[in-house]
Structures are given as C-alpha cells and as structure tokens.
Amino acid sequence: MSRKFYITTPIYYVNARPHIGHAYTTLACDTIARRQRLLGAETFFLTGTDEHGQKIERAAQAAGKTPQQYADEISAEFRQLWKRMGISNDDFIRTTEDRHKKRVQELFRKIRDNGFIYKGTYTGQYCVSDELYVDGAQPGDPCPTCGRITETVHEENYFFKLSAFQDKLLALYANPEFIRPEARRNEVISFVRSGLRDLSISRSTFSWGIPVPDDPKHVIYVWLDALANYITAIGYGSSHAGAQEAFKKFWPADVQMIGKEIVRFHCVYWPAFLMAAGLPMPKAIVAHGWLLFEESKMSKSRGNIVRTETILDVLGSDALRYFLLREVVFGQDGSFSFDALVQRYNSDLANGLGNLASRTLTMINRYFKGEIPYPSHAASKTVADDAIAEVARKTIREFGTLFDQFQFSRALEVAWALVAAVDKYIVENEPWALGEKQDEDSRSRLATVLYTAAEALRIATALAHPVMPDATAKIWSQIGLGDIKKLALSELAWGQLRLGTKLGEIQPVFPRADKSAIERMQKMEEEQRTTPVADAAVTAATPPAANALQSATVSPSAVPAANDKISIDDFSKIELRVGMVKVAERVPKADKLLRLEIDIGTEVRQVLAGIAEAYSPETLVGRKVVIVANLAPRKLRGMESNGMIVAASLEGGKPVLAGFLEDVPVGARLK
Ligand code: MSP
C-alpha cells in the first residue's frame, strides 16, 4: 500500500488581495507536495480561504458589498493566482461552502457532547484584525500582536474548556517533532505553562459566521470555524461513506505549515479542539518567518505589499518560486527586494542552471547529432569525471535530507553547488577544443565529458523540479527524457541517462534579465500604490481614504459642480464626526503621511493623513479631530484609509486641523 501524505497551508483571509507574503506559505507547501508525489506518496495538498468573521464583514461593508460578494471576489483572486503560480493543490476549501459549514457544526456538537462547551459571559478586549481575545487588556489598550486598538466586547458566549487541556498539551509538546522550529516550540510551551483560560468560541453581536447548532443567535468563533477546515475538507463530519474514507485515510495531517504569527491558534487551540473531539493530533506544525519589505512585515495594513502578479509578468513563476525558497532561510524572516530577485535570477538561473543546460545540450547537438553520447572505453575517464559523479551522489542524499527538514535554502544551495562544480568541470575539460579534433581518443574523451555534464544536469533538474516545475519540465524534455512528472525521485541515481537518448528542441529557459526588469517591476508596484489625491478643500490634510462605509457614501455623480450651491439634503449626506487620535505614526518612505487610529465612538478607524510636515505624531495622540466618516474608500501606498480628517488649507498647502474650544464628546456628529 502506498504511503499517504497530507499537507495544509493556512486558509487565507479574504479581506486582503493576495501578495507575495501569502504566496510564500503556499509555495513552500506546494514544493513539499510535489516532492512527495515524485517520491510516490499518495499526496493531498489543501489550501483555501477564510471568509467569516467581523473583519471580513467590515471590509465588505467598507467596499459597499455583501460579505458573500466580497468573499467570492477575493477568494477567486487567490485561486487564479495559485493557478498562475503552478500551485498543485488537490482541493481548495472556502469556509462559506455548505460542506464546511455543516461539518463545523458537527465538530461543535461533538465537542459540546463531550462536555467541553458551556455558556458564560465574556467581558473583555477583542482585536478584530487578528480575531483574537486579548486577555488582561483594558479598554483602549492595543493588541499585543498587531498594535491596533482593541475593542470592548461584552457578550453572552459559549466557552470552550481550554483550561482542561493544559497538561495534555504540555505532554504533546514533549514530542520535539510536533512544533517546529525549536524556538516556536519553546514559546508555546512557556505560554501554556503560564496557564490557560477558557476560550470564548461564539459571538452574538454580528452574524457573518456559522450559526451555533441549536442556538442560531450565536455564530461560531471564526478561528474554530477556520481551523476546522483542515478536517472538514477531507470529510470529517460528513455522512457520505466516500468522505468518511478520505478522512480516515488522510487524517492526521503530516505537515501543517503556518506563519509564525498564528502559532498560538495552531499549536494551542487547534490540538485542544481536536483532543476535545477525540481526534488524533497532526504530526507536525511547522512555522515559517515573515517576508519583509521595506524593513517590516509585508502586509496590507502597512501598505508595503508586493503583488505577485508583477513578478509573474516580468520574470515568471519559477523565478519567484526559486527566489523565495533560496533566499529566505526557512523559519527566519527574510527581506524581499527587486534587486536581490533579479540578481539571484541572473546568477543562479540564467547563468547557472539555464546556461549549463544550453551549453551542454548545444554541444551534444553539434558534436553528437543530438544524441546522448557514452564513453566508449574506460581509458577516456579521469578522476575529474568520478569526482562529479561523487558530488552528484552526495547532492541527491543531502538535498533530500535538508529538504525534508524544511531547509529549502540549504537544499538549493547544495544542488547549485553541483551546477557550479559541473560548470568548472566543463571549463577545465574544454569540450569545444576536443570537438575540433577527429582522433578517436578526443572523440571518446568528448563523449565522457558531455555525458558527465548532461547526467549532472539531469540530476540537478530532477531535484529542482518541485521548486521550479515549468522550467525543469522544459529542460527535462530538451534532454529528451519526456514527461518529468513520471520521474521516480526515490530511484534517482547517477548513471541512468541512456546512450542514444535523442535531445528535444533546445530553447533558452531563463533569458537574462537586465536592469530594466527591476525598474519595470518597481514602476508597476508604485503605480498600484499611488492613487490620485482627493480634490476637496480638505485635500492637504486628507490623503485618499479607503475602507469607509461606502454604502453611506456620497457618490461622485451626486457632487455638484464647483460653483453650484448645495441643498441641506446634500450637506446632510456628509457624515462629520468628532474623533480622538489613539495612535499616530509615520509611514515609512512617505514624508507627508501619518497613519492614525481614530476613535469615533462606535469604532476605531485607520486614517491616513498628509499632515506629517505640519504635525509630529506625538502631538496628535489624545487630540480631538473632525473626520468625514462616510467618505468613499481610497488607497494610498496600498494602505487603507477609512475616513478623512478635516483641516484648513493655508497658503503653500500647510494644513491646520479643525478643532473645538469647548470639550466635545468623541463620536458627536457635526451638523
Ligand atoms: N486566516 C488566517 C489563517 C487561518 S488558518 C486556520 C490567516 N490568514 S492570513 O491571510 O492573514 O495569512 C495566511 C498565511 O499567510 C499565514 O501563514 C501568514 O503567515 C502568511 N503571510 C501573510 N503575510 C506574510 C508575510 N509578509 N510573510 C510571510 N508569510 C505571511 O492568518
């Protein structure tokens, strides 16, 4: 019976369009899944989208859409992007699908029937962005994970008896393979040792979620809903025999890959939910670091994302796949830059593997009529040939070990050391000079040198296939080996390339990229981030805003011409409110911009304001301001701005913020 292998990515929130930070998790899993298939395992690779919760509900509202419409659009973007990137997932689960909803309710029921759910009242702070209860925080405190102001929640909820699992979880972590890398494991152990409080697992103040079975006033906490995808997708909770079989076959998962910021959910809550339902534990939870851009985590709220499409358009998917896995030391944070991307592309792909393929195959074409030659007698061999064979054998062994320990960059380094060794070997053995001679010894030596080069090329190509599926498939067929998907990786060994194999048509696989590639990509991203500045009198103080309550927005067509008078009805459409600045900070690489978090009574809004030259961030915290609360969504530098601050615009564009002489309550409406 064949070995099975089940691997999962986290499911992606649909409040943000995919960027290369998301792509990193997905493609790390994709390469593992592809390698496992080549090793003969019956592999199931799952990814999907996380579509419920308050965060998504609000994002949809801001975009003037229903949560379902909004989720449909962004979920589709993820699917299209994964297709373009050659992601080989076997299923794509959406948490708004019926199959998921029903099965999550089954899980809830099971945990409740097992006695681990009770009703209680929760009063405390909640971070909507992380969908996280922040224990011990006071009203107005920031979320310890993302720094955004938490919101006070007072609700009757269902609670999960997390506290009952402290010892069982600690016993689980005794297995060093369960949480990787070690540093994350230690963090989790000390978190759990410090004591676990029961967890609120339902919400009743909004409705965008899966109803609690038998009590539909409540929706299931979005993290319980989301985590369950790993089992609902493969059939848990289904009454169909086929689905039950699949669940039995694939659960527990072999690898659950996550980013480091969601370790607590996956290493504490998830195993506790599974224990409460009487289900087996996944074999390994593996956490990677972050992709940084402009020195901080690439994320929508920071406005420093790089879109995957830009890189795909200019360099193609394999270049991005190789770069991310080669450049980032798995488990640690890694910086992304267009310069480094192009440099790596040129050195390792265009001049490295690509050049080895084209020079070796071109010479076989020229000197051996496009058929793989073979050394005709032992005398034509030297120690240099054996040395390459030895490096290749060692590469096969080490690559596998490193890769299976998730050390992708080291594994690729080892494979590219083979490419470099063969390059050196070609230079030292000068096949082009041998090719000019007609004597038998020279012909025989030439055959040996080109065979050795082609065989090393075959091995490097086979190993790199899970990382760069397209380019390696092309090289494979240029060597004349047919469909690379038929490769049995576990049998890969030196000396399998057969005499007389006919080469396919030779074409360059990685054309060199020049400086203009960098400029092109930077320009594409810059255009994406910058949107024209608003045209009202308040412009100087108000960068383009996004994420406003669009449903209540004055549509552009309703705005009268400049000299027209407006009616009181027109004016009343503009919602001006008193807000208090809770957080103010500069936006990296934007001299004029400040990022503000403003409490407007009903909620805390992120607003971007072009006032950094007139106000330093410290002077603004605690200050009351006037904000246009129902402005249409806009974006600046890719960041959301949810409203607009009102200011007088002095000569030269200097903004002066509107304020009040008397004290006014936060949230008061200006009429
Ligand atoms: N929806 C939750 C996960 C629920 S799983 C039951 C979530 N979604 S997310 O869209 O915010 O993140 C999904 C994955 O993308 C995470 O593994 C996260 O670490 C990864 N990344 C998002 N930005 C990233 C970087 N800048 N760098 C690397 N990975 C990052 O969390």
Image: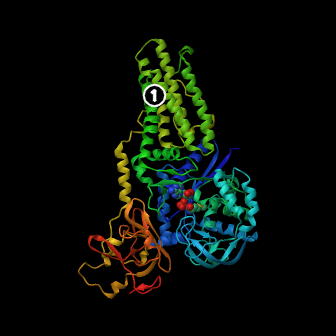
Q: Where is residue 183 shown, x and y percent of the image? A: 64, 52
Q: Is mark 1 within 8 Å of ligand 1?
A: no
The image shows residue 103, relative to residue 174, as above or below, that is below
> Given the current orientation, which residue lies at the most extreme top position?
439
Q: Does the image show residue 64?
A: no
Q: Amino acid at mark 1?
A: Thr
- Residue 103 sits in quarter: bottom right
Q: Nearer the viewer, residue 79 or 512?
A: 512
The image shows residue 395, relative to residue 513, as above or below, that is above
Q: Where is residue 469 shown, x and y percent of the image? A: 51, 43
- Please indicate whether residue 80 sits to the left or right of residue 101 in the image: left
Q: Where is residue 341 shown, x and y percent of the image? A: 44, 46
Which corner quadrant of the figure contains ligand 1?
Answer: bottom right
SS type, badge 1: helix
Q: Nearer the viewer, residue 447 or 238?
A: 447
The image shows residue 166, relative to residue 628, as above or below, that is above
Q: Nearer the viewer, residue 266 or 282?
A: 266
Instruction: Find disc 1 in the rendering and name its residue.
Output: 360
Q: Quadrant of the N terminus?
A: top right
Q: Where is residue 266 shown, x and y percent of the image? A: 64, 60
Q: Residue at x 37, y 81 (%)?
A: 574
Q: Does the image show residue 368?
A: yes
Q: How is the image coloured?
A: rainbow
Q: Residue at x 39, y 48 (%)?
A: 314
